[in-house]
Amino acid sequence: MTVHTLKQCRPDQEETEYFWKLFHAAQRNDARRHGSEISIIADELSRTDLDRNQKLFLLRSWQVLVDDKGGFGRFMGAFDTYVYNMQDPDDDCVAWKPELAQILNDGNCFDVLLDAYQEAQQRIAGLERANAAQDDHINQQQDRIDVLERRNAELGKYAGELESRTVTVKMYDDFQLCHYGTTEDYAKGYIDSQNNFTKWLSAAGIKVKGE
């Protein structure tokens, strides 16, 4: 029988520091709020030019890091516990400390490892169920973004239609009104009202065409 041994490289110190920087940046967002802001983030993303995959990435990142749905803080804590207590500091790959490797070789830790393996299996099953529920939530938020984008497009189209509207208004000057037999005071009041009316229409985005 041939036995193949594979080695898994582990993150170095600099790479690990970047993960901690990401964790602390997420903590700063978490400290300033009360409750999840995932719906607010979805609303903001609906008004961007990002494509669907980019929006899903940002939603998922916020959910995992800030809302802590993936237990990122526990993951980093567990990783540090492993590095300082179990990892061989002189090996760039995943490897037991020499003293732990000796105990394993002697078979003194089998029962402990078996219990840990079974506990890990139960934890993985629980995380898979939680992730399935979170996937549904993310999909709902993406659907919300799609609805908002369609609504924004409809509003933009409606605004364009409003801007393109033109009304024809019979415009008089004071000479014409006096010619019809009105007094000068009446003509002045009429002209003022006529000017204010055209200003209101213009403010509403409606073009005024005189005849």
Image (cartoon, rainbow, N blue to C red):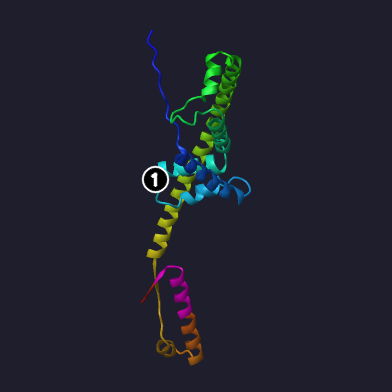
Q: Is residue 121 visible?
A: yes
Which segment did they paint magenta?
A: 195-207
Left or right of residue 36: residue 3:
left
Q: Would you name the residue on which mark 1 appears?
A: 51
Q: Count the numbered circles shown.
A: 1
Q: Is residue 143 visible?
A: no
Residue 185 position (above or below residue 164)? below
Residue 57 drawn at (x, y percent) = 45, 41
Work out which quarter of the rendered image holds the N terminus and state it.
Answer: top left
Amino acid type assigned to the residue bearing label 1 in the image: Asp
Between 141 and 169, the residue placed more toward the observer is: 141
Between 62 and 179, the residue placed more toward the observer is: 62
Between 16 and 168, the residue placed more toward the observer is: 16
Query: Which of the 4 image quadrants contains residue 159?
Result: bottom left
* Residue located 56% across and 19% down the image: 117
* Residue located 44% across and 76% down the image: 198
Residue 92 drawn at (x, y percent) = 43, 31
Between 211 and 90, the residue placed more toward the observer is: 90
Q: Which residue lies furthest to the right in this view?
A: 34
For the stretch drawn in magenta, the main secondary structure is helix
Q: Residues within 10 Å of mark 1 (few under 14, many from 20)?
A: few
Q: Does the magenta stretch include residue 198?
A: yes
Left or right of residue 172: residue 185:
right
* Residue located 53% across and 42% down the image: 65
Q: Is residue 129 magenta?
A: no
